[in-house]
Amino acid sequence: MSALQIDAEGFRLDDKPFRILSGGLHYFRVHPEQWADRLRKARLMGLNTVETYVPWNLHEPRPGEFRMDSGLDLPAFLDLAAQEGLHVLLRPGPYICAEWEGGGLPSWLLTEPDIRLRTQDPRYVRAVESYFGQLLPPLLPYLATRGGPVLAVQLENEYGAYHQDPAHLGHLATVLRTCGIDVPLFTCDQPADLAQGSVDGILSTANFGSRAAQNLVELRAHRPTGPLMCSEFWIGWFDRWGGRHVVRDASDAAASLDELLAAGASVNFYMFHGGTNFGFTNGANDKHTYRPTVTSYDYDAPLDEAGDPTEKYTAFREVIAKYAAVPDEPVPARGDKLAVPGIRLALSAPLLPHASALGTAVLSEQPMTLEELGQDFGFVLYETTLPAAGPALLETRAVRDRAQVFVDGQPVGVLERENHEHSIAFTVPRPGAVLSLLVENQGRVNYGLGIHDRKGLVGTVSVDGTVLTGWTNRPLPLRALDGIPFAETVASPVGPTFHRGTVDIDVPADTFLSTAGWTKGNAWVNGFNLGRYWSRGPQHTLYVPGPVLRPGRNEIVLLELHAAHRERTVGLRDTADLGPVEE
């Protein structure tokens, strides 16, 4: 593949004018055995390029522990893109937003109590330099200057919406160049933030979803010459728990795309294929009220969460065909789906009595945050004793993000950050009763100053004005469930409980796990963490990639935090239920 050139008129490739027709496709949100399928469908829609972020927090989960294997095998993803004849726009951050946990910044950065993320704070800069020093060398053969698919690399991400610090952006550019990145660099910002987020000598691009002509005028006013590009053309949106499933009319989005391409601009759809926030990886927003993002990242994109073409796929393909050659092949058909109703989860195990099998306790005078415990995702079980019997008022400084409160194992209430809750009243049955708080990290904030988002019990906890001390802090990352002693029970135990069942499958295929009748928790299939479910919606099914299943017996486990389904059953459906829509 050839290197991309930027001149006063626009992009050039092979010494010919070139328009980037790209779509967002995050390898870390898609099962690796499905990468090739999604890339093929990108080409068939008429795209010549795909874009991906790179999540620092997955690639370096602990300082110096670098991963690029399995679902994080970015070189393998780039190889597949090249085999499909697609170019790549690489967005390595270090901050990515992406509605991803912490905007991709690893939680261990927050062990420094006063660290200033996304600035020239030496502690942050050293960590970024170390990360890029591990990430980038294996990717150098994939740069277009060396015959690979990567045409350009993004510098930071929407920095103008966060801060104005040209020295920091300039330093990041120097780090990228020092690490061997010799393809063009670019920044992306919303039009109002272009001045704050741009760097002299680096291509500025804009992010928007409508009013293309007006937004391109603003981009041109900021950069009088060079290519016009929308690096995030928003054709859908993400969902939050308790909201509705956000959709955008296909004809409206196609008309905006036509306006954009008619102006001669290049484009990157955000998203072409959204995928899924598997496990505990969803982010959150906090504009005075904390709002966690749901598990599905369907994004109302041209390819839906299961990789099937939507109405937008056909509409965009028709618009693209007016400006570029589109493969003379039919729109891909919908993939096979699996449906199995009434799968009983007959075995169970309560969490609280078996917590010691899932994490090692750490003792401290005051509660420790997840970051202090060296934990990124999941839960922490905090326990101490209560000094006296009788009515009591429990007060916390900050719960991040949701605490279930128990006294001697009996539930007495819930404290939710989303509802700005800090206190709860209950009756203590005896002196020395055990107070337990099971605190869930529901997703670190991924946008704005709120990214300094430490989790767990932050600060002191008091009862009737007396600060409680002598805490047991037990991390429960739930990376493996091997130590759980499942057994048959007639009735579900009180409180958070694991439920297990099996289903026999002849031919594996994509499916959707229905958790109707359950309340809140996480689901695993064959040990693969599908993500969170919550009866408040909007989504009521979890996507199960076909490669997660196997011929024969398959295991399903739910961690139900509250009330189990009366019959303790789940179902596999052949269609998704992402909830009532908001247009």
Image (tube, rainbow, N blue to C red):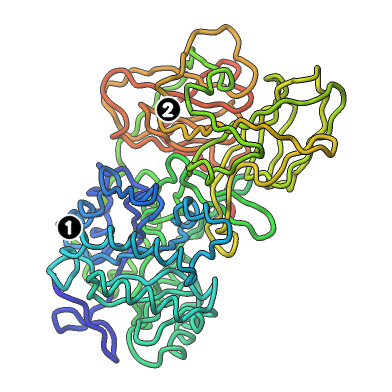
Nearest the eye: 458 or 471: 471
* Residue lying at the far right of the rendered structure: 391
- Point out which mark residue 154 bears: none
Query: Where does the image place residue 149, in percent across and percent down from the top left?
Result: 19, 65
Which quadrant would residue 223 be assigned to in this image?
A: bottom left
Task: Quickly name the residue at label 1.
Answer: 84
Q: Nearer the viewer, residue 143 or 149?
A: 143
Residue 450 quadrant: bottom right
The residue that label 2 is drawn on is 572
Which quadrant does the N terminus fall into?
A: bottom left
Q: Is residue 36 above or below residue 517?
A: below
**Nearest the eye: 294 or 399:** 399
Disc 2 residue type (three-letter): Leu
**SS for dot 2:** strand
Marked residue nearer the N-terminal end (2 or 1): 1
Q: Of helix, strand and loop, which one carries label 1?
A: loop
Q: How crowded is the residue under tag 1: few (<14 C-alpha within 10 Å), some, or many (20+)?
A: some
User: The disc labelled 1 sits on which kind of residue?
Assistant: Glu
